Structure formats: C-alpha cells, structure tokens
Image (spheres, rainbow, N blue to C red):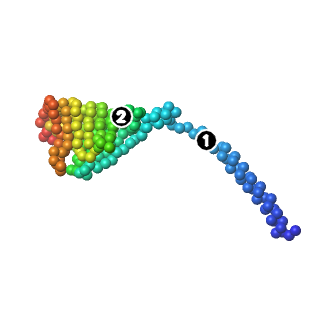
Amino acid sequence: MDGHSRMVQFFKVVLPLVAILMLSTVFLLSRSIETNVSVPFTQQDIDERLADQVVTQPNYRGTTRKGEEVQIEAIRATQGREGSIPTAAEFRGRMNLLDGGVITLDSNSGMIRPDKNTATFVGDVVITSTDGTEITTDLLNTSLDEIRGDAPGQVNGTGIIGNFTAGSMSFGTEKTDGPVHILFTDGVKLIYEPQRAER
C-alpha cells in the first residue's frame, strides 16, 4: 500500500471521529447556557399589563391645521378593562405656537382621543406660557387640531399684571390667523401688582 492510500485510510478514520467530537462539544456547551433568566416583572404585573393593555411612555405628536406643533406624552397609559375609560399617568403636553411662543401643560393623569382630536388633563393641572403666565386648575380639555382649550372649573394663576382667580377659563384664537387669547369668566378676581406689570 502506497503513501497516498495510507493517507486516505487515515482520514477516513480521523474525520468521522473529529465530527463526533465537535458535535458532542456543541451539546455540552448548550447545557451550560443559563436558560433560567429572570424577568423584571412578577407574574401578577404581567397579568395586569395584559388585562389592562398597558403602554409604557406613550408619545403623541401632531400638527394643527395652521401648522402649530402639538406633543403629548405620559409615563404610562392603560386602555383599561371593558367598560372603563383609557387613562395615562403623569400627562404632559406642549404646544409650539407659530409666533415662537410655547404653552406647556402638566397634570397627574389624562386621556387622549385622536379619533375626536381631543386631550383631557386631570388633577393638579399646571398651564404655563412663555409670556410668564402660570395657571392651575383641576380639569382642562384641549383640542389636537387647533390651539384651543377650556377649564370648566375654578382656575388660579399669576401673570405679568398680578395674581388672579376665576370660575372658568378658555383659550384659543378669535380669528383664523389671530394670536392666542386667554379668556377668564365667572367671578374673575385680580390682585393688580404695578411693579410686576412694569417689568
């Protein structure tokens, strides 16, 4: 038998042995992989999220008919169980006006209805604008397709002319291309501060 034949015989024996050795190594390594990975949620958390259809950090961005930007976000939102209203926690909004002004909205909770072009802010609502006005109320309804909103309950606020309270409030434009105005109604009280108005 020549050298070539001996080499062929050698590989016929060695190669199958190498293949078997490699396969056994793969199976041995696969057994050492950690398959019991812990999930940062309890089974109860998972069941509640599935039942309530919870969404973490939802974010809505849109544009009004005039081109102003509207953004609304929350820490978490839930669709709720059958018959309940979808809600979101730590509800925040921002409206970028065409003139460069900004209105920010913060509340404990709220809900957004893109199908109706509305968003509702509920609980410790704080409304601030770049002109220095800050208003607090318990409930604020806003529009998504235009810069418009109303607070049907009491409002308290501070502005460039002083402190004020009112039974209700609304904001929006009086004309299609006009500036945004805030209208206070139902027993408006103003404590005028000349020093603040002169700034």
Image spot of residue 189 (x, y percent):
14, 30
> Is residue 15 toward the left or the right of residue 164 in the image?
right
* Disc 2 target residue: 85
Considering the image in quadrants, where does the N terminus appear? bottom right
Local packing at callout 2 (Cα closer than 10 Å; few below 14, some 14-19, many 20+) is: few
Report the amino acid beneath label 2.
Ile
Residue 165 seen in render: no
> Is residue 7 toward the left or the right of residue 160 in the image?
right
> Is residue 191 toward the left or the right of residue 107 in the image?
left
The circle on residue 89 is none
Report the amino acid beneath label 1.
Thr
Q: Residue at x 18, y 40 (%)?
A: 182
Mark 2 or mark 1: whose residue is earlier in sequence: 1
The reply to whether callout 2 and callout 1 are in contact (CB within 8 Å) is no
Image spot of residue 48 (x, y percent):
46, 33
Quadrant housing residue 104: top left
Considering the image in quadrants, where does the C terminus appear? top left
Q: Residue at x 14, y 37 (%)?
A: 161
Q: Is residue 145 above or below residue 44?
A: below
* Disc 1 target residue: 35
Q: How many numbered discs? A: 2
Q: Nearer the viewer, residue 17 or 83?
A: 83
| Secondary structure found at label 1 | loop
Q: Residue at x 26, y 37 (%)?
A: 141
Q: Nearer the viewer, residue 46 or 190?
A: 46
Quadrant housing residue 60: top left
